[in-house]
Amino acid sequence: MPDAYYLQLTEQLRYLIDEHAMQWAGKLPAERALAERFATTRVTLRQALAQLEGEGLIHRSNRRGWFISPARLVYDPTRDAGFNDYVRAQGRQPRTAVLKLETCPHLSAARVLGLPDDQPFHHIRRRRYVDDRAVLVESLWVVPERAPELLEMYTDQSLWGLLRGRWGHHLANRSIRMVSEALSPVDAEELFVAPGTAGLNICRAIFDDQQRPIEFDEEHWLHDSLCISVDLAGQQ
Amino acid sequence: MPDAYYLQLTEQLRYLIDEHAMQWAGKLPAERALAERFATTRVTLRQALAQLEGEGLIHRSNRRGWFISPARLVYDPTRDAGFNDYVRAQGRQPRTAVLKLETCPHLSAARVLGLPDDQPFHHIRRRRYVDDRAVLVESLWVVPERAPELLEMYTDQSLWGLLRGRWGHHLANRSIRMVSEALSPVDAEELFVAPGTAGLNICRAIFDDQQRPIEFDEEHWLHDSLCISVDLAGQQ
DNA sequence: TAGTGGTCTAGACCACTCT
DNA sequence: GAGTGGTCTAGACCACTAC
């Protein structure tokens, strides 16, 4: 048993959460109630809650309270299975909200794809849910020449399915980058969490089999909502 | 400009850090000094520092103070380049400390590799440094039949180089799993950071070209010390 | 409107690091 | 031994959510 009281608190909270998960319907009691139950202050209690948040056991919805986190979604960023497919394959319910559709330049997309700085892109920004919890926001930057009427026909299906089916693109080469982050105020707000919440930033640049740039995408996940899994055979 | 004072503080600290990085030799002034400079309390100041820590700009060495974080190490967990090689290739200085050498069973290694629960392994635990900052601890669990005299001959070279060169293993198939975490008290202590510091857990199971299990390894990285990068060609 | 979480104050003690 | 970071107390106000 560690000596710091807030670390002992995490142990007791873990037990409490495990015991009352059903009864509480996933939402923890008010901070003041918990602080009183453990005869401590809100500051110390919140330190314990923050620790459990870092572990991925619980999370906050901004100003609404603390909630028990569901199991992580297993995600393989090297495959181009659609979000809806792999979420359903894990027995979960996917949902997507489109936040923006526009055509405009974007510096980092241009740089990563090796295009001029003023290159315009079709930009799709969307929020994705698993079992009604918003778990990521993402921006897709598609080279317009590769998918001219994209914004007119896009609803909320798989973008890659569309690129393959409608325009016959072969998504052959990709470079992927993953970095831990603190969610920006904008991303945090769109995910209904407090600014600075821990996130995971995943960027992908996609080229076809002739090395032509197709698309750049940038995902911001809640850190506790995914488990990245990659399987490789016969490499090296 | 956000309204919360601690968020304004992060902006001012960012500027201050950028300006004084050289002068301070990478270490920030004492918390009390910073709190006084910004006419606030240590609690609020620490909230701002924690925000910057989440972003990866600064980090703590337990009870020693706050330090400016160096650039992230770019790391491709799908390749088996040795740590020493890719650290040096990025102009950084690698170092390794061996913490433990033993032979014993390990449940999760056995499960992942598809071996009986009481299967013994050669266990190597080591701490790795980049430019004298401890950035990860890892445990390697090697099937003894694949590398019988491993513990006698191991110093601190590349394990995979050894497996290839000494025993002729072909590391053909691997499954990789990455999850954000809060470092356990043990891992945190071995990395000289406060318990609960944000980390990234990377696990790998390695099989040879006949699907025989070779090795399982479990890495615990400081979350701000790496940028995961994967390049794939001709997939799918 | 009542209650909640988000933020902030102004202290305090202790274990540890540094010199 | 001085100073530091880690921890903790006992309050407070405000913006927002839930009802």
Image: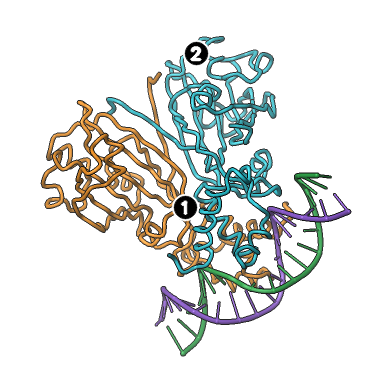
Chain colours: A cyan, B orange, C purple, D green
Q: Amino acid at mark 2?
A: His
According to the picture, the residue beneath numbered tag 2 turns out to be A169
Vertical order, B112 against A153 (above or below): below
Vertical order, A85 against B225 (above or below): above
Residue located at (11% from left, 44% from top): B148
- Judged from the image, the secondary structure of the residue bearing numbered disc 2 is loop
The location of residue B193, given as percent across then percent down, is 43, 61
Q: Badge 2: few (under 14), some or many (20 or more) residues near its Cα, within 10 Å? A: some
Labels 2 and 1 in the same subunit: no
Q: Is residue A195 left or right of residue B23?
A: right
Nearer to the camera, B44 or B14: B44
Nearer to the camera, A130 or A16: A16
Chain letter behind tag 1: B
Q: Badge 1: few (under 14), some or many (20 or more) residues near its Cα, within 10 Å? A: many
According to the picture, the residue beneath numbered tag 1 turns out to be B182
Residue located at (64% from left, 26% from top): A123
Tell me the tag on residue B16.
Answer: none
Nearer to the camera, B150 or B95: B150
Q: Quadrant of residue B207?
A: top left
Q: Amino acid at mark 1?
A: Ala
The location of residue B107, given as percent across then percent down, is 29, 44
Chain letter behind tag 2: A
The location of residue A225, given as percent across then percent down, is 53, 39
- Judged from the image, the secondary structure of the residue bearing numbered disc 1 is strand
> Which numbered disc, 2 or 1, marks the residue closer to the eye?
1
Give the alpha-carbon distance from disc 2 to disc 1, as whole Å: 41 Å
